[in-house]
Image (cartoon, grey):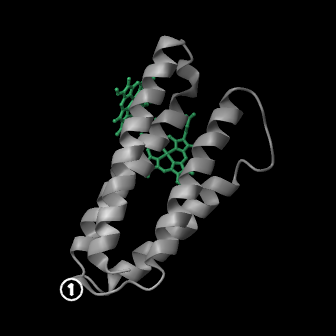
Amino acid sequence: MTAGSLSSLWARSGLVWLVAAMCFGLYLGITEQLQIHPAHAHGALLGGVWGMGFSYLHTRIADDAPVAGGLWQWLAFNLGTALFVAGLWLMLSGTMTPLIPIGPIVVLLSTIWIAVSLWTRMK
Ligand code: HEM
Ligand code: HEM
């Protein structure tokens, strides 16, 4: 995919995360489950704020060039964030499973991949 189409994809997923995380925050407040707030915070910050951050950074790539693996980077980061949020939600509700670290590890690795691929290509 080109950098321009990836920028729109990242912006759209960021907007979806933002609205979903706000609904989640409202739900946590109304149901008085404030102890779960880190799940809400990381959905809004990683999916929403960083989704839009990556959208902006893709506009800085010269000549709207194709980005090899760009769609996979988007998929890995967003699925990793969803797993991270679900894992935090489970953990903070008192359910521990060995699957909990998978989400943050996928988020970290995909972020390193995105950072390396953007680093040399920015205007
Ligand atoms: C309609 C919008 C939102 C609602 C209803 C909402 C609701 C909440 C609630 C109920 C808490 C827990 C507060 C506590 O434990 O005392 C919280 C914490 C938090 N929210 Fe939201 N939130 C919203 C939007 C956002 C957005 C857009 C972001 C980030 C971009 C965000 C980031 C955070 C963070 C970082 C915390 C943890 C704060 C702390 O540790 O003190 N929230 N939110
Ligand atoms: C793989 C990435 C990340 C991991 C593993 C991670 C992990 C954590 C952990 C373990 C906590 C403590 C939660 C608690 O006190 O119960 C925390 C808190 C926090 N993190 Fe992250 N974090 C990540 C990324 C980020 C990013 C990118 C942001 C900001 C853009 C962020 C913002 C915060 C904030 C504001 C808090 C304090 C509010 C809260 O308790 O929810 N984190 N993080």
Left or right: 55 as drawn, with respect to 86? left
x, y (%) of residue 47? 43, 50
Left or right: 27 as drawn, with respect to 8? right
- What kind of residue is marked 1? Ala
User: Which image quadrant: the N terminus?
Assistant: bottom left
Left or right: 41 as drawn, with respect to 88? left
x, y (%) of residue 34? 53, 19
* Disc 1: residue Cβ within 8 A of ligand 2's nearest atom: no
Callout 1 crowding tier (Cα within 10 Å): few <14, some 14–19, many ≥20: few
x, y (%) of residue 48? 37, 47
- Per the image, label 1 sits on a secondary structure element best described as helix
Name which quarter of the figure residue 121 lies in: bottom left
Q: Residue at x 49, y 34 (%)?
A: 40
Q: Where 62 sits versus 85, above or below? A: below
Depth check, front residue: 79 or 106 = 79
User: Which image quadrant: the C terminus?
Assistant: bottom left
Q: Is residue 50 visible?
A: no
The residue labelled by disc 1 is 62
Depth check, front residue: 23 or 77 = 23
Name which quarter of the figure residue 32 lies in: top right
